[in-house]
Image: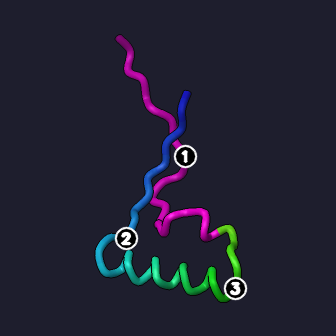
């Protein structure tokens, strides 16, 4: 059964500021694990879809 997770991701000016920050840190410090993921806040742990009886 597939697992799901909910993330809140920034948009607008905050997203742009974070993108600029990530670009600068990657250039000055090199890539790291944080550069592989979009900026986000995890809202839930992993969960599975609930199947209702027919």
Residue 11 horizontal/vertical position (percent): 32, 70
Residue 53 horizontal/vertical position (percent): 38, 15
Compute the Cα span from label 2 to label 1. Answer: 21 Å
The residue that label 2 is drawn on is 10
Label disc, if present, on residue 46 of the rendered structure: 1
The answer to whether mark 3 and mark 2 are in CB contact below 8 A is no
Q: Which residues are magenta?
A: 34-54
Q: Residue at position x 50%, y 35% from top?
A: 48
Residue 25, magenta (yes or no): no
- Residue 23 in the figure: left or right of residue 27: left
Secondary structure of residue under mark 1: loop
Q: Residue at position x 38%, y 79% from top?
A: 16
Q: Is residue 15 above or below residue 1?
A: below
In this view, which residue lies farthest toward the front?
Answer: 27
Label disc, if present, on residue 29 of the rendered structure: 3
Question: Is label 1 or label 3 in front?
Answer: 3
In this view, which residue lies farthest toward the left?
Answer: 12
């Amino acid at each position: 059964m597939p697992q799901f997770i909910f993330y809140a991701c920034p948009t607008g000016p905050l997203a742009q500021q974070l993108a600029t920050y990530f670009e600068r840190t990657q250039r000055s410090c090199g890539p790291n694990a944080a550069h592989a993921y979009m900026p986000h806040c995890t809202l839930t742990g992993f969960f599975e879809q609930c199947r209702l009886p027919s």
